[in-house]
Amino acid sequence: MATLKEIAQKANVSITTVSHVINGTRPVSEALRQKVLKAMEELGIEIPVNKKRAHSHLIAMLIDDIFNPFFTEVFAVAEATARSMDYNLLILSSIKQGEDILYLRDLENRKVDGVIVATRLSLSHLKRAFSTHLPMVFLGGNLEVPFSASVLLPDEQGSYLATKHLTELGHSKILCVGGPRKFSIFRDRFRGYTKALEEAGITVNSQLMVEIPLTFQAAYQFGLEFLSNAHQKVTAVFTHNDPTACGMMKAAQNLGIKVPEELSIVGFDNTFVTRLTNPTLTSVNIPKKLVGKRLVEMLIRLIRGNNIPNCVIEEVSLDIKESTAPVNTR
């Protein structure tokens, strides 16, 4: 599918003009409008163009897992930001990719002005979703298609900081429990993990890079099996989110493994649950309030016909709590 930039180049007009013609957000001369329509036709783009579109002032956020505290904290700020800009924010939770596409099409039928996509759709599914032509902002991942922008997170750097913390404590047998590497967010987190190991002179063991559903229950079941296997002895675990870290901690404790004396554990996102575990959980801190605010601000700018660049969140740190300690050499 052609991008706004390609349409603009074909029509010899600005990207902003293309956006206004397609969305009807501002008046455009008939001559410019016809140039844009002709360029779209030559590029094989079938996009319904309205001279004027009435906005519903309703936007939606589509997420993977409503039980993940990361989304809870991001949504709280996003909803407040939307209200301050005279919009209402609807949250939808979906897991199956086919359902995501149905959600997006249903949202268009309900006259939703735009969508924040914080669910891990594959590239092919995302391209299919763009038959709806809704303005969209993606959390993580970058897809160059019309009416879209992305908020990109420091996934690689965050994972690097977490793993480096463990290597500096003397750990060399570090298990990394993450999500499917077919998604860029998890590829980046595995990359940060391997980068820190290589920098510390530790050989990367692919058997210690595990992909599982990133939920408490899945991590708990996996932890019981993995940690009870004497042949898979590790002294530390880094996980790609906090619920997974909590599941691994619970499994370790049920097996009589002391945290952090015998097993250090690090999570990712630094959500409120890190303060509820015993011991409290060391975790990579992502500025969730900033993420929620930027997602809504960018989407509303797109809805209003503005051409905007991606937003790269660079702020990341490690909140060291009680779940990590120097490796026990006894």
Image (cartoon, rainbow, N blue to C red):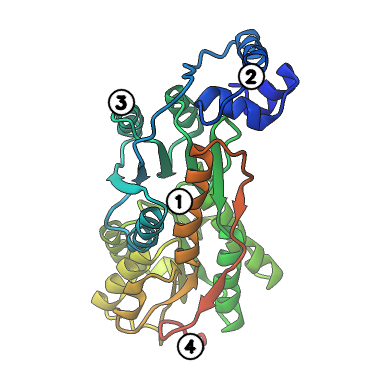
* Tag 2: amino acid: Ser
Task: Establish if 56 lies above or below 293.
Answer: above
Tell me which numbered mark, 1 or 2, is placed earlier along the sequence: 2
What residue appears at the point 70 percent right and 69 percent down from the top-left corner?
199
Cα distance in 3D space between marks 3 and 1 = 21 Å
- The residue at which mark 4 appears reads as 328
* Tag 1: amino acid: Val
Asked whether 303 or 169 is in front, the reply is 303
Tell me which numbered mark, 3 or 1, is placed earlier along the sequence: 3
What residue appears at the point 29 percent right and 44 percent down from the top-left corner?
92
* Tag 3: amino acid: Asn
Q: Position of residue 190 (x, y in %)?
A: 55, 56
Tell me which numbered mark, 4 or 2, is placed earlier along the sequence: 2
Tell me which numbered mark, 2 or 3, is placed earlier along the sequence: 2
- The residue at which mark 1 appears reads as 296
Label 4: few (<14), some (14–19) or many (≥20) C-alpha neighbours in 10 Å = few
